[in-house]
């Protein structure tokens, strides 16, 4: 008789559920401005953004499927979101786009300083090492629980996308991010 460890058994038992949920998910590959602007007023409020974002994207960030985001999930999620060509490396162009919108006030090393091995790319380990020395994740964790809940993650993303700090995401702000982060 074959025996399974607890982790393997959990994966075996949850696979059918994951497949069922993914088939039931109505998320399109690329949600549009109109999908977020649920009241059709030409703007995305924070409440609209949080509702759509949490319903469609929060689980994507939870790589351990443990129903919460710790700093490792968060950094892993941002790294692979920035990696637009899916080569598991950040080019200088990918780094600059992400850095300018997410980490501009937290990381002071330049690209070459973060690329410790000097291969011209930032690998995940180099990325997480530099972020681990900042308080960026802690600033997203508004309730200081050491985990990001759905609202904290969605609020943080909303604040970044609301470039002019108006409390609303306009079409041009949405287009700026949507054109780069193609899976939103």
Image: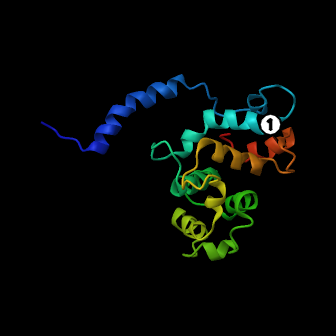
Question: In this orientation, does residue 25 appear?
Answer: yes
Q: Quadrant of residue 17?
A: top left
Between 125 and 83, the one nearer to me in the picture: 125
Among the 4 quarters of the image, the one containing residue 124: bottom right
Looking at the image, residue 22 lies above or below residue 90:
above
Residue 75 in picture, x, y percent from top left: 57, 57
For the C terminus, give its image quadrant: top right
Residue displayed at 61% across by 59% down = 137
Q: Secondary structure at mark 1?
A: strand
Residue 95 x/y as whole percent: 68, 62
Rendered residue at 55%/53% (across/down): 145
The answer to whether 25 is drawn above or below residue 138 in the figure is above
Label 1 belongs to which residue?
Answer: 45
Circle count? 1
- Say which residue appears at 35% left-offset and 38% top-offset: 11
Determine crowd level at label 1: few under 14, some 14-19, many 20+ residues with C-alpha closer than 10 A: many
Residue 47 in picture, x, y percent from top left? 74, 35
Image quadrant holding the N terminus, namely top left
Write the residue at 83% across / 25% down.
40
In x, y percent, where is residue 19? 44, 28
Q: Quadrant of residue 6?
A: top left
Q: Is 85 placed above or below 183 here?
A: below
Residue 122 seen from this side:
no
Q: Residue furthest left?
A: 1
Color style of the picture: rainbow
């Amino acid at each position: 008789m074959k025996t399974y460890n607890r982790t393997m058994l959990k994966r075996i038992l949850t696979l059918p559920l994951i497949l069922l949920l993914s088939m039931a998910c109505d998320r399109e590959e690329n949600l549009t401005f109109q999908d977020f602007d649920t009241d059709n007023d030409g703007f995305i409020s924070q409440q609209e953004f949080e509702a759509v974002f949490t319903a469609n994207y929060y689980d994507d960030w939870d790589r351990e499927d443990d129903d919460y985001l710790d700093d490792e999930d968060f950094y892993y999620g941002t790294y692979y979101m920035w990696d637009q060509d899916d080569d598991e490396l950040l080019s200088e162009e990918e780094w600059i786009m992400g850095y300018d919108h997410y980490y501009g006030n937290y990381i002071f090393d330049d690209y070459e300083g973060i690329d410790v091995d000097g291969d011209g790319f930032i690998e995940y380990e180099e990325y997480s090492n530099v972020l681990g020395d900042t308080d960026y994740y802690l600033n997203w964790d508004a309730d200081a629980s050491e985990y990001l809940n759905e609202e904290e993650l969605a609020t943080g993303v909303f604040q970044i996308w609301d470039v002019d700090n108006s409390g609303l995401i306009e079409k041009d702000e949405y287009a700026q991010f949507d054109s780069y982060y193609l899976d939103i």
